Image (cartoon, rainbow, N blue to C red):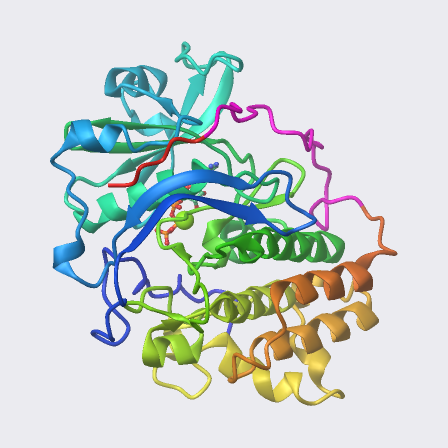
Amino acid sequence: MGNSCRRPAKCAHVSSTNFTGSTESHSKSKQHSSTSRQSHSKTSSTSRHSHSKTKKDSTSSNHQPNFRSMNQYNTSISNNLKSFSLTDLKNVTKNFRSETLIGEGGFGFVFKGWIDENTFAPTKPGTGIVVAIKKLKKESFQGHKEWLAEVNYLGQLHHENLVKLIGYCAESENRLLVYEFLQKGSLENHLFRKGVQPIAWATRMNIAIDVARGLSYLHNLDPNVIYRDLKAANILLDSNFNAKLSDFGLARDGPTGDKTHVSTRVVGTQGYAAPEYVATGHLTPKSDVYCFGVVLLELLSGRRAMDDERAGFSDETLVDWAKPFLTDSRRVLRIMDTRLGGQYSKKEAQAAAALALQCLDKDPKIRPPMVDVLATLEQLHTSNTTPRRPLFGTESHGNKQSRHPQKTKEANTNYV
Ligand SMILES: Nc1ncnc2c1ncn2[C@@H]1O[C@H](COP(=O)(O)OP(=O)(O)OP(=O)(O)O)[C@@H](O)[C@H]1O
Ligand SMILES: [Mg+2]
């Protein structure tokens, strides 16, 4: 299994193929009337406040959101977000010209645009601050659902390890999202793309800590939020290699009361998704812990979660390949990325590998909660003061403080 394998098969989004065809459907659409989602996380700076919503499950066609009723739906958007017109977004991206294109994913193309730092008003390209603008592919009907989930979650959730959603556009059939721009793009590009400088060990550990902090924040909300699509492609890096979770299109509220799980159609990405979730559709925060274990393995090994070139072999997934090494203390360091050139703390690497093994336990009950994962990582990495940068060469160090603070108006989120 080499480092040059292709991107993991995307069988993930609501808009794409299922893993298993179907699983049982979610019990019922939830009604929260002005319920409060409180954060118990020490790491969180804000919590999710009074929202009123009816969330629909992706499994039943009866539960599809009605996107035709735009008046009703427009009132459902959080007041924290700026509403942009399509003309605004055309102007700031030079009419979505290819020179402003920065990426493409299942949802659609991502463009670079410019807005005023204080008012968020559109500005002439090249002036103001840079934002990333995601434009939903028109042919993707289920993409509307992901768009709405993104707006609903990121309109309310604010944390230094979650990407900031600045605004949106919902004009006739067009659906766009406007985010803070993360200068270094995705972790996937830095770990796996050929010709990119390898990320130094200390930076990899800091990225793991940032991701664990983001997930701990989500899991400690009340009701908790299951992110469901953790993978290297959805971890974005700022100029200082601070990591943020992006893409909340598949996020779900976790089980409440005495429920142990929520039942969903199986969506996620092959190679990352927890086996019991793929088998049953039963979703718990421990599904995210498994995904985190896979990302941790990717950081350690520099190998992709899923190696398409080994499809059909017993070590098709990174987990299958790595497990025999992880369970053998004498051979555990054989998983390490050779591009690190041996420049890492063996003690830290062994501890991180042991943690990955726990996160990847087949039994979700054995996996540690994210808050414990975070504590372990912080503990094993406290002594390290190395600045975040690639292994070789220099990088500019950005300000950790966001340049676009969210407006503090209370969210008004009546979900359709
Ligand atoms: N806020 C952002 N700042 C900078 N670059 C971004 C931002 N959001 C997305 N990108 C770039 O656009 C690319 C595509 O992102 P997108 O989330 O649409 O797809 P993906 O994560 O690669 O795949 P998937 O459809 O599975 O989520 C990313 O890899 C990244 O390089
Ligand atoms: Mg993504």
The structure residue drawn at horizontal position 79% and vertical position 44%, both measured from the top left corner, is 387
Q: Does 206 sit left or right of 369 as displayed? A: right
- Residue at far right of view: 383
Q: Which residues are magenta?
A: 387-410
Magenta stretch: residue 389 in it? yes
Q: Does 217 sit left or right of 96 as displayed? A: right
Q: Does 59 sit left or right of 126 as displayed? A: left
Towards the viewer: 11 or 289 = 289
Horizontal and vertical percent position of residue 45: 64, 39
In this rendering, does residue 234 appear at all?
A: yes
Is the magenta region chiefly helix, strand or loop?
loop
Horizontal and vertical percent position of residue 280: 33, 79
The structure residue drawn at horizontal position 64% and vertical position 43%, both measured from the top left corner, is 242
In this rendering, does residue 302 appear at all?
A: no
Q: Residue 268 falls in which quadrant of the image?
A: bottom left
Q: Residue 256 falls in which quadrant of the image?
A: bottom left
Vertically, is 260 above or below 374? Answer: below
Towards the viewer: 126 or 22 = 22
Magenta stretch: residue 312 in it? no
Q: Quadrant of the C terminus?
A: top left
